[in-house]
Amino acid sequence: MINYFWFTLIGISAIVGVLTGRIDQLNQAIMNGAKDAVEISIGLIGIMGLWLGIMRIAEHSGLINLLSRALYPVLKPLFKELPEDNMAMGAMIMNLSANTLGLGNAATPMGIKAMEELQRLNPDKESASDAMCMFLVLNTECVQFMPTTMIAIRAVEGSKDPAAIVLPIMISSITAAAMSVIVTLLIRMAYRRYKV
């Protein structure tokens, strides 16, 4: 389905570019987009390699299992279908921990790892499981205790008080995360009721 959507957008762009005489601008945009995609992909190789390596060390040392057991009671109500010592829970915990510290790039490889583990447990490989949907919601609307990236950008841009955004972001992210979880649970309940 998404392929048809993208193909339609590309086709409309090409037709509009030809009709308006802006085909050169369209070509330039395509080249710039392709260049940016490659630069971003290469830029992520290092940080993903680093954190996947740390994840492997943490896995073999038992750190992930220890951390998972500590935070398991907090996340268990949201992920009832997961086994207690599953790797997915450890990856999700580390992903959410990195996100709360504003380390979005560091959280990415752990989020991918968590999704891979959740997909292994997913009985229907063609559809996202409840755990996958809940993790996506928590990942997207994660509570931010220290938005380090935003603080760094504000500092670079000359803000007099780069950390002034910490409290507003903390309050707004907690509110958004709570509402997102509530809405997700309500949708899950409504879907199960309708399905039955």
Image: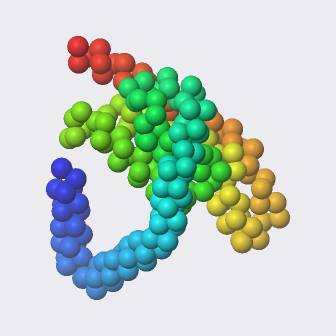
Residue 170 location in percent, x, y? Answer: 69, 42
Can you see residue 176?
no
Say which quarter of the image contains residue 174: top right
Residue visible at 71% across and 60% down in the picture: 151
In the displayed orientation, state which residue is furthest to the right: 160
Say which quarter of the image contains residue 4: bottom left
Residue 40 location in percent, x, y? Answer: 44, 72
Between 37 and 81, the one nearer to me in the picture: 81
Residue visible at 18% across and 62% down in the picture: 7
Q: Is residue 56 above or below residue 118?
A: below
Residue visible at 24% across and 76% down in the picture: 17
Can you see residue 156?
yes
Between 25 and 78, the one nearer to me in the picture: 78
Q: How is the image coloured?
A: rainbow
Q: Is residue 34 above or below residue 142?
A: below
Instruction: Report whether 152 appears left or right of 142.
Output: right
Q: Is residue 52 above or below residue 44?
A: above
In the displayed orientation, state which residue is furthest to the bottom: 24
Instruction: Report whether 60 appears left or right of 81.
Output: right
Residue visible at 58% across and 38% down in the picture: 66
Residue 106 location in percent, x, y? Answer: 55, 59
